[in-house]
Amino acid sequence: MVAWLKQLNTSEQVALLFVVLFGFLTLLTLGLFLNSLRERASEDERAASQLTWERVRRDLRAAWIGGCMFWVAWISGPLGATLLFALFSFLALREFITLVHTQRSDHRTLIVAFFVLLPVQYMICGTRFFDLFTVFLPVYGFLALPIVSALADDPRAFLERNAKIQWGVMVCVYGLSHAPALLLLDFPGYTGRGAFLLFFLVMVVAASQIAQEIATRTLRRRPVARRISRSFSMRAWWIGTLTGALAGTLLFWITPFKAGQALAMAFVTAGAAGFGGLVMKALKKDAGVVYWGNRSSITGAVGLLDRIAVLCFAAPVLFHSVRWYFQLPLGWK
């Protein structure tokens, strides 16, 4: 089976991948629809499971959106994918900044973050200058932001205000920009197949998060950070991480990795995603919200950042692990 798949050209492999992906989502959607018809006949049962199925519907809707965005990223090429993720970064950073209570004196700093640092970071990514790409924001960006803030002549909570903005840039821009960067890595004999690395990332993270959620709901909880999350436990984290590692191993044939290499890469990626989710919960606790985006969390509204937060942690870990292990070039030769 694997030998037959490898004999297919790049276009045929991508077509098969999308057939499997959208076919699976169609089956899930059909199953959810049939379940909703069954629940209409039993009002008591519907009321008892309403919250659970609402979460499933929300997650399935997000999966459809993610699958369509992945398809758009593929057909638009590396440039289109880079622009698409730049838009995601902009929207996610806007959600983050909206909830961290910045001051009027931070406006110029935010303008620099949104309209200078973000587009320059993605421009560097798109041109494959990965040596500058990896240090531009952590070095130049994080030095520029407090300088602009100091010029506003407002010392009130200066450190706290700048730390919030810098952390938002770190997660929403720097972290997420590594996802399209995976499309541009230059593997010998793997030219034109960078989208499979991005698919590998998404599937590993999705599998790990689903398994961690199931483990959290079914196993006895032993939270390690009770005041941040009563549901996060190391047992659930291990189950999610190992599930993600297994999913990555099964997908090794679409990557430039061997099975053992895929296992290791998927393990560190899934592990980072799990801990990233905990960090984002801590940030939401500090901001006093349940969900990013719409404040009216009682409606179940969930922002974009809730969907991509774990990718913001997992993408740079996978990107730099791959570059370090395979000794890939820093940019254009």
Image (spheres, grey):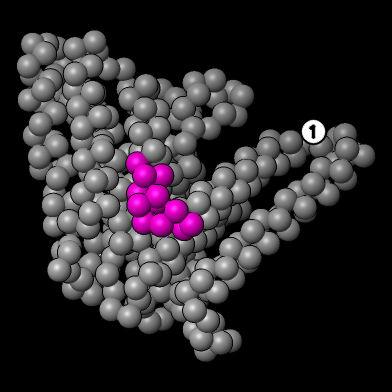
The part of the image, by quadrant, that contains residue 150 is: top left
x, y percentage for residue 46? 81, 37
Q: Is residue 108 left or right of 284 when viewed as pictured?
A: left
For image coordinates 18% across by 57% down, the residue present is 130
The residue where tag 1 is placed is 47
Front residue of 145 and 226: 145
> Overall secondary structure of the magenta stretch?
helix
- Can the viewer see residue 276 in this picture? no
Q: Which of the image's four quarters has the N terminus?
A: bottom right
Q: Magenta region: which residues? A: 74-86
Q: Is residue 101 above or below residue 141?
A: above
Mark 1 Cα-neighbour bin, 10 Å: few <14, some 14–19, many ≥20: few
Front residue of 188 and 248: 188
Q: Is residue 131 left or right of 40 when viewed as pictured?
A: left
Kindly state the secondary structure of the residue where label 1 is placed: helix
Front residue of 311 and 117: 117
For image coordinates 46% across by 27% down, the residue present is 293
x, y percentage for residue 100? 32, 22
Q: Residue furthest right?
A: 41
Instruction: Tell how many labels.
Output: 1
In the image, residue 208 lies in the stretch drawn in magenta:
no
